[in-house]
């Protein structure tokens, strides 16, 4: 059998697998909009990134070496790495939540969402890969600062997109509610 | 002992009976108005069966002409099946303006890429061109259905059981056709009768799936409404989203400014 046929058959089998995946019910129940509203009002983990990064700085525990408490320094660093890992999990959950909200906004969007959605897909993938990479870096005891900065950058990017999308939805809603309005009103108070 | 040709004739008769049964069921449940293209597609398969049977029975034409007419009718049926896909995608996605605008482009892109991929891997001889083209269309249709369902799952859009059954029936038939035809083209040419029989068998499976779906589900009863936000809450939610994101942005940007100053 030629390679071309094998490739075609493999592609067909891949489609069967994807079909089975697409037909599975979603992991969690569909969130009512009120829940999303509530989720938005919770405090954000990524705001605590500076404390976490500071705690991971070697200089923060270096004085223990000078005072001869090497074992304590190592324990402290291990514990802080564990905290950073937990923080990373929370950050990932938060990112997923933002993506979930952005999906809901996309469903409600009255205009084309192509570029923003593709950008969000790319970000989701990159975020998942970077999270996994950072987790391994932490487990191996390597310095993860640049990784954290990158993840925060992604969170900012998603947040900006959400900002833009929700503003557009609000503008469209206002246009519908007040068709004679100029459309120059300030949305969301800023 | 029953020969392969007799088996094939029996399968053909069973297919026609199932097509007529599904047609009657669509009429009885008034689903022909809801899915006019699917209705037309089913009608075309019935007419195709009649036409091909008449063609072989008459026996006036030479082998090549018969082959050409048979593949012409098949081309029309495949074309109508592609239109059924458009009808289905519109029903599932077009209620969401933003998503539909994105999905249209992606589905078209997927269809074109997969079709090109199939032709690229096909044999070069012109006599295989029509059959390879049909296989490319089938593969593209399967890919489009899978992409559409993935879209619906990602955005948690409601897909009714009837729509899902129609999509699965179309997709599985297309995938089976591609695998079956790829094997025939390359390794099983001496088993052409068996290939035809298996092709009919796959279509019978799809017909049974559709008939069950049309009998069990109606278009109106099973659709879970998409999340909807009342206008007053919509405005409130949007303002809240904006405020949260604005604060989040500002604090994160401030943090990075502090980091920049440090470094």
Image (cartoon, coloured by chain):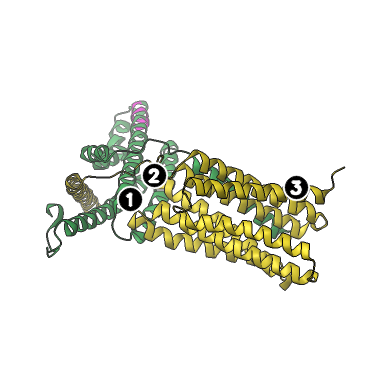
Chain colours: A green, B yellow
B150 relative to A78, above or below: below
Name the residue that disc number 1 marks.
Answer: A107
Nearer to me, A95 or B101: B101
Which residue shows up at 23% across the image and 58% down it? Answer: A168
Indicate left or right for B14 with B41 as reference.
right
Q: Is residue A76 magenta?
A: yes
Determine if residue A63 is in view: yes
Which residue is the site of mark 2? B156
Q: Which residues are magenta?
A: A72-78
Please state which of residues A170 and A1 is positioned toward the viewer in this rendering: A170
Q: Residue furthest right?
A: B1
> Which numbered dot is residue B10?
3
- Residue A179: give x, y in percent of width and height: 15, 62
A162 with respect to B139 (left or right): left
Q: Quadrant of the N terminus of chain A?
A: bottom right
Disc 1 chain ID: A
Q: Position of residue A15 (x, y in %)?
A: 57, 50
Q: CA distance from mark 3 to mark 1?
A: 48 Å
Label 2, label 3: how far apart the Cα atoms are: 43 Å
**For numbered disc 2, what is the local secondary structure?**
loop
Mark 2 — on which chain does it sit?
B
Number of the front mark, 2 or 3: 3
Helix or strand or loop: what does disc 1 sit on?
helix
Q: Nearer the viewer, residue B209 or A42?
A: B209
Measured as percent of width and height from the top left, residue B93 is found at 40, 53
Location of the C terminus of chain A (image quadrant)? bottom left
Mark 3 burial class by Cα count in 10 Å: few <14, some 14-19, many 20+: few
Can residue B122 be seen at all in this image of the molecule?
A: no
Tags 1 and 2 touching, CB below 8 Å: yes
Callout 3: SS: helix
């Amino acid at each position: 059998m030629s390679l071309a046929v094998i490739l075609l058959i493999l592609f067909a089998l891949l489609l069967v697998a994807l079909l089975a995946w697409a037909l599975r019910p979603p992991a969690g129940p569909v969130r009512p909009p009120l829940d999303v509203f509530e989720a938005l009002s919770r405090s954000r983990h990524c705001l605590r990134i500076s404390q976490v990064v500071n705690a991971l700085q070697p200089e923060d525990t270096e004085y223990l070496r000078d005072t001869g408490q090497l074992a304590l320094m190592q324990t402290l660093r291990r514990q802080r790495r564990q905290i950073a890992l937990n923080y990373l999990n929370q950050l990932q959950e938060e990112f997923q939540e933002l993506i979930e909200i952005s999906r809901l906004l996309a469903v409600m969007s009255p205009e084309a969402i192509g570029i923003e959605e593709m950008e969000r897909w790319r970000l989701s993938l990159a975020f998942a890969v970077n999270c996994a990479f950072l987790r391994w870096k932490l487990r191996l005891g390597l310095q993860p600062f640049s990784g954290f900065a990158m993840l925060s950058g992604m969170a900012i990017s998603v947040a900006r997109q959400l900002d833009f999308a929700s503003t557009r939805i609000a503008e469209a809603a206002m246009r519908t509610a007040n068709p004679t309005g100029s459309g120059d009103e300030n949305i969301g108070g800023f | 002992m029953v020969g392969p040709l007799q088996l094939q004739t029996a399968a053909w008769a069973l297919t026609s009976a199932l097509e007529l049964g599904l047609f009657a069921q669509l009429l009885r449940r008034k689903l022909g108005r809801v899915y006019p293209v699917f209705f037309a597609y089913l009608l075309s398969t019935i007419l195709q069966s009649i036409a091909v049977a008449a063609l072989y029975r008459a026996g006036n034409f030479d082998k090549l002409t018969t082959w050409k007419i048979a593949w012409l009718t098949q081309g029309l049926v495949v074309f109508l099946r592609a239109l059924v896909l458009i009808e289905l995608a519109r029903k599932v996605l077009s209620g969401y303006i933003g998503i539909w605008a994105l999905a249209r482009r992606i589905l078209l892109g997927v269809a074109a890429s997969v079709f090109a991929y199939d032709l690229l891997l096909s044999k070069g001889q012109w006599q295989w061109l029509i059959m390879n083209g049909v296989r490319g269309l089938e593969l593209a249709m399967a890919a489009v259905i899978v992409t559409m369902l993935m879209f619906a799952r990602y955005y948690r859009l409601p897909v009714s059981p009837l729509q899902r059954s129609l999509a699965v029936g179309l997709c599985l038939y297309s995938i089976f056709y591609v695998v079956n035809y790829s094997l025939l083209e390359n390794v099983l040419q001496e088993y052409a009768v068996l290939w035809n029989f298996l092709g009919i068998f796959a279509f019978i499976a799809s017909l049974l799936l559709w008939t069950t779906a049309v009998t069990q589900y109606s278009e109106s009863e099973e659709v879970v409404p998409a999340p909807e936000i009342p206008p007053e809450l919509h405005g409130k939610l949007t303002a809240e989203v904006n405020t949260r994101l604005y604060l989040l942005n500002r604090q994160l940007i401030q943090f990075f400014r502090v980091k920049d100053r440090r470094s």
